[in-house]
Amino acid sequence: MENSDQSPLSDRLMSGSDYRESLRRYRPLVYVDGRQIESVADAPELRPGINALSVTYDFARDAGKAPLMTARQSTRASVVNRMLHIDESAGDLLNKLEAVRLLCQETGCAQRYLAHDALNAIHQVSARIDDAKGSSEHRARFADYLMHVQDQDLSLGIAMTDAKGDRSKRPHQQDNADAYLHIVERNGKGIVISGAKAIVTGAAYMHELLVMPCRNMGQEDADFAVCCAVPIDAKGIAVVSRPAGRPGEKPEHGQPLFSRRYGQATAVVLFERVFVPWERVFYAGDWEHSGVLTYNYATHHRHSCIAARAGFGDLLIGAGALMCEANGFDPGAKSNLRETMVELITIVEGFFACGVAASVYAKADDASGSFMPDPVFANIGKLLLGTKIYDMHRLAHEVSGGLIVALPGPDEDHNPATAASLAEVLRANPDVPYEKRIEVARFMEDLTASYQAGWYSVISLHGGGSPAAMKQEIWRNYPVGDKVALVERLLDRGILDDPARPITRNRQPGRCCDSGCTQPGQAVMVPLPAAGIAGTKSPT
């Protein structure tokens, strides 16, 4: 996969093998299935996750993929991995979307894109805090850290979701304060933090953790409003991880053809009096800005999730077509299969189109100048993929037939008493050998009907926030007021704007390309003059 001989970045960015070797320089305390892992880089239970992260490194060094997988950070005039880039345009967001889809076509879930989402959110909130305080300290501190991460080409785990304890209580009201990560001590050198973070993707095989709040905090929750970076092997950190993928598993239908190679681990990370020096603290106690950070991260992350599940959808589409062929059918000629395949394609490309729209309609953040995906399209796309993942599986099952869960065990392929008979009776299309039909059936089983498949479904539904959270953001940001004004104008009702009227609260003018419709280059959508709402034609 690596193509360093052709890449000018070979001395600047790590390869997949470099990444594996870099993990050996860390000594994290990691537990998997009740057993302490001595060497993360050599642990079979984590290998599928490490393989997935390695792809993000190798693709960036491949000359053919580098234009998509890398980006030039203009503030430094430096080329960096796309997964560590601060977005400077709508084009950057489009390229990130395509890069994540490409990575997830290969790996199912590349995981490293969470670092991009968190870095962009912290970049934006650092600028906002400085503007509020009339300082430059937070910008400078984050810029130094970003340079460190980009120059070292690190992988970052995002420690955002707290254990939360009693959901009806706020952080400061919890009987056990460690249900939310919090500051327990401040001194001239830094802060000391304790608590638990849950659902930390890939934690065991990351270089560092970015600690972030998971919700909007009130003044009484100030100690819980903390954002900082810590090495994965910092004293006081324990990582309690699930295995990645299905390594070493011997399920009924044979070795998993995909998830034994690529997978995703999640972990609970326990912090017990972990010291963080001030240069790694992006804010501590700034509760007023916790909501901005979580909102910005969620918007970036939901945009990335769209691309990730589109890549997974590409695997389902390809495997579904292969199953049709292996079963002896041409889906283009058989209407029931064609309609099912088109429905699957429509779902995948439909939510991906929302990601494209969120990129094109992106706008610069007021404080930092970096670009944010449009929140309405980002949330609609994530809502669609989260709820339609089950339909994607169903449609893949429809075109595949029951063979994917009715196969004899793989040992029968080598049983002299049964192998020849099975090869004869389980062959369908004479042009597709028995072993090829069985192979794609087992691949589809791994993607859609295995333990790992069910796990991915739950992650798709709840990762990046629950469907209720996305619906809330869609309603909060969608310009329903414009639609109400449109109908009232057509009805000639003459009702004046009333700021207190709930259904007319959200208003947004139309938008047009910033450089005009006939200009070459990347189109960025910008607001039209407010007069455009009332029907006045605005020049473009």
Image (spheres, rainbow, N blue to C red):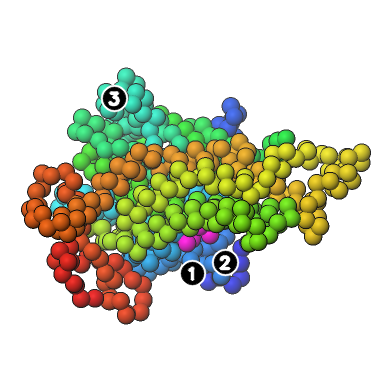
Q: Which residue is depicted at the point 27% across and 28% down?
A: 170
The amino acid type found where label 3 is placed reads Lys
Whether residue 503 is visible to the viewer of this picture, yes or no, is: yes
Residue occupied by mark 2: 62
Residue 244 in the figure: left or right of residue 138 = right
Residue 290 image position (x, y, % from top left): 26, 41
Residue occupied by mark 3: 169
The amino acid type found where label 1 is placed reads Pro
Residue 252 in the figure: left or right of residue 180 = right
Check if mark 2's residue and mark 3's residue have beta carbons within 8 Å.
Answer: no
Residue 253 image position (x, y, % from top left): 73, 39
**Which quarter of the rendered picture does the C terminus lie within?**
bottom left
Q: Mark 2 packing: few (<14 Cα in 10 Å), some, or many (20+)?
A: many
**Which quarter of the rendered picture does the N terminus lie within?**
bottom right
Residue occupied by mark 1: 67
Which residue is outermost to the top?
175
**Secondary element at image label 1:** helix
Q: So how many labels did they put on this image?
A: 3
Q: Which residue is depicted at the point 59% across and 72% down?
A: 6
**Secondary element at image label 3:** loop
